[in-house]
Amino acid sequence: MRDRVLTWLADNVPASRLQHILGVEQMSVELANHYHLDVEKAAQAGLMHDLAKYFKPNLLLQMARNEGIEVDPVCEATPHLLHADVSAIVARDEFGVRDEAVLEAIALHTLGRPGMSDLSCVVFIADTLEPGRGETPELEALRQVSFSNLYKALWLTCDYSLRYLLDSHCSIHPRTISTRNWALSKSSQKTRPVNRPTDTVVVS
Ligand SMILES: [Fe+2]
Ligand SMILES: [Fe+2]
């Protein structure tokens, strides 16, 4: 299937985006390996996460509505946000992906969702932190965190994206904030030692 997806991508996304996609595929595989998740599913979701990245706004809206996906006011104003949901539709209809975990990871790679699976966290993080995104000290630090605490990396990746959106005067989807808050609470649960008094807990 990988070759078929790559052929399709060559016709539907520019070469620079293909590089990003391959970077997400690779980092998703590395993170999945590290966290003992299904590597094959991580590779599939990484490879297909941006299938609809270059679909026109009207097509994104139409495909999302046909699928019964709720198009809220923020997505209505910024249909590009729907490319994650629509990429999952393309993965299913064009490439026959039926695995719900893979489809969820694709659909949630932009906004996330509280309660998202670890596989979805991996693809979300890889989308922002794959090597092609740059080598700033902030990104390098986030990459290190991504291999030590998955939820902390998700929380800080959301913060990184939120800062970018604020600086760029872009709309912020409420789900980015609820994903961030969920990841923040999960990251402290995950690192809290069982028999330690709360006041001495260090959140790493
Ligand atoms: Fe994307
Ligand atoms: Fe992406």
Image (cartoon, helix red, strand yellow):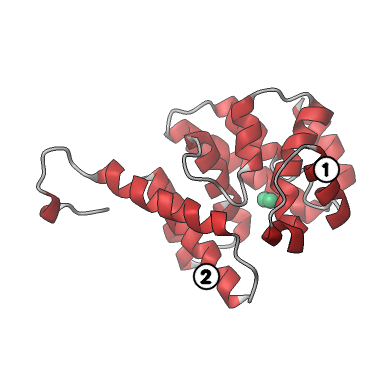
Residue type, numbered disc 2: Arg
Residue type, numbered disc 1: Met
Considering every residue shown, the one lying at the far right of the view is 11
Q: Secondary structure at mark 1?
A: helix
The CA distance from mark 2 to mark 1 is: 30 Å
Camera-side residue of 204 and 73? 73
Could you tell me which quadrant the N terminus lies in?
A: top right
- The residue lying at 26 percent from left, 44 percent from top is 191
Query: Is 191 displayed left or right of 56 in the figure?
Result: left
Q: Secondary structure at mark 2?
A: helix
Residue position for label 1: 63
Query: Is 95 displayed left or right of 128 in the figure?
Result: right
Residue 6 appears anywhere in the view: yes
- The residue lying at 59 percent from left, 62 percent from top is 134
Which quadrant holds residue 150?
A: top left
Nearer the camera: disc 2 or disc 1: 1
Residue position for label 2: 163
- The residue lying at 55 percent from left, 39 percent from top is 120
Q: Position of residue 11 (x, y in %)?
A: 90, 44
Tell me whether the residue at label 2 lies in contact with that at label 1, contact meaning CB atoms closer than 8 angstroms: no
Camera-side residue of 59 and 46? 59
Q: Position of residue 102 (x, y in %)?
A: 63, 30
Mark carried by residue 169: none
- The residue lying at 71 percent from left, 57 percent from top is 75
Q: Position of residue 83 (x, y in %)?
A: 74, 49
Query: Is 101 displayed left or right of 191 in the figure?
Result: right
Q: Position of residue 174 (x, y in %)?
A: 56, 59
**Upstream in the sequence, badge 2 or badge 1?**
1
| Vertical arrangement, residue 57 with respect to residue 47, above or below | below
Count every numbered label the image shows and give the total: 2
